[in-house]
Amino acid sequence: MPELPEVETVVRGLREPLVGRTILDVWTDWPNTLRGMPVADFAARAHGQAVRSIHRRAKYIVCTLDHDLLVVHLKMTGRLYVAENDAVVEADRWVHFRAQLDNGQQLRFSDARKFGFVKLAPNLETLAPRLGVEPLEDGFTPAGFSLQLARHRTAIKALLLDQSIVAGVGNIYADEALYLARIHPLRPANSLSEDEAAALHAAIRAVLAEAIEREGASISWYRKPDGSRGEAQRGFAVYGREGEPCLTCGTPIEKIRMAQRGTHFCPNCQRKS
Ligand SMILES: [Zn+2]
C-alpha cells in the first residue's frame, strides 16, 4: 500500500495541474468508489466547485474545494492523475472515476483492485476521526513519542502501523525505521528506553524524508501522477531483502509474519533483548 512518501509525492505532482481548476462533472463505472454517494448527487454537489488547495493528511489525499473536501485514498492499487480529455494512458485500463475539469483535462482515479475511494466530505474528521500526529511536523517530538510508547505493551512494529499513534507510516517504512534505530520489531513498545525512543523518532523522520526525496517506492502499483516510477525502493536496507546480507554486519536479513504482514529485520543488529 502506498504510504506517506508515496501519497505526498502524488499530492506534490497534482498541485500544479489541479489547483485553480473547477470541477464540471464526474463519472464512475464502479459506484462503490464513491462509498455510498450516488454519482448524480456527487456530480451535482461537485459541479462548479474550484480546487483551492491540495494536501496530504496521513495516507489521505485532500483537495480543498470551495465548499467541500474531495478526499481520495489510494489503498492498494490506486493511481490519481490528470490527463487531457482525449489522452489515453496505461493506468486508464483500471480507471473507475473521472472528474471533468474546466480546461479540457480530467482528474482520473485508476484502481485495479477497487479498494480505494473518492469521497466528498465536509471535513476529514468524519472520515478519519482518530488520526495520530504527522511524523514530519513539529508536533511529533521525541518526548511525546516516548510517552506514547510507554503507554503500550504492543509490539513496537504493530504500534508503528497504528494510524492513531503516528499517521502515514505503513509496513515498509516501519521496517526501515526499526532497522535504522536498531530495534527488534517484536520488542514491547513500553520496553524501549528514552534513548531508543529518540533514535526511533529520528529514524522515522529520516526514512520518510529520504523516500520523499526519491519520490516514493514503486515496488508494485504505485506510480507518480505522470506515470513514472519512484526510486525509494533502491534505498531499502531490509524491506524485500530477506536472505540478503545486512548492509551493516552481513548477517542474512530475516522475514517473519506479524499480524499477517511481512516484517524484515537483521537478527544481529536488532536484538530482542
Ligand atoms: Zn546487521
Image (tube, grey):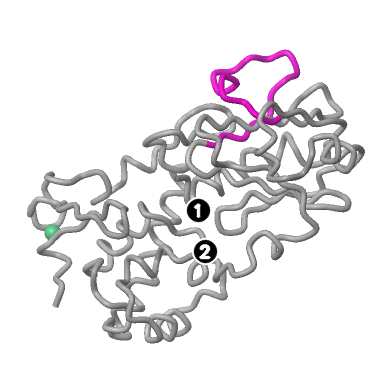
Q: Quadrant of residue 198?
A: bottom left
Instruction: Relative to 49, say whether 199 is above or below.
Output: below
Q: How busy is the neighbourhood of tag 2: few (under 14 within 10 Å), some, or many (20 plus)?
A: many
Magenta-colored span: 78-97
Residue at 58% x, 42% y is 116
Respond yes or no on whether mark 1 lies under 8 Å from ligand 1: no
Image quadrant of ligand 1? bottom left
**Given the image, on which type of amino acid does mark 2 rest?**
Ala
Query: Are dots 1 and 2 in contact, CB under 8 Å?
Result: yes
Instruction: Relative to 43, say whether 245 is above or below.
Output: below
Q: Secondary structure at mark 2?
A: loop
Q: Disc 1 versus disc 2: distance between alpha carbons? A: 8 Å
Query: Quick one: quadrant of the N terminus?
Result: top left
Residue at 62% x, 26% y is 95
Residue at 34% x, 41% y is 233
Q: Which residue is tagged 1? A: 4
Instruction: Relative to 142, say whether 246 is above or below.
Output: above
Q: Quadrant of residue 36?
A: top right
Q: Which residue is tagged 2? A: 167
Query: Quick one: quadrant of the C terminus?
Result: bottom left
User: Where residue 128 sits in the image (x, y, percent)?
Assistant: 63, 62
User: Where residue 136 sits in the image (x, y, percent)?
Assistant: 52, 64
User: Where residue 156 sits in the image (x, y, percent)?
Assistant: 32, 71
Q: Quadrant of residue 218?
A: top left
Q: Is residue 241 left or right of residue 56?
A: left
Answer with mark 1 or mark 2, whichever residue precedes in sequence: 1
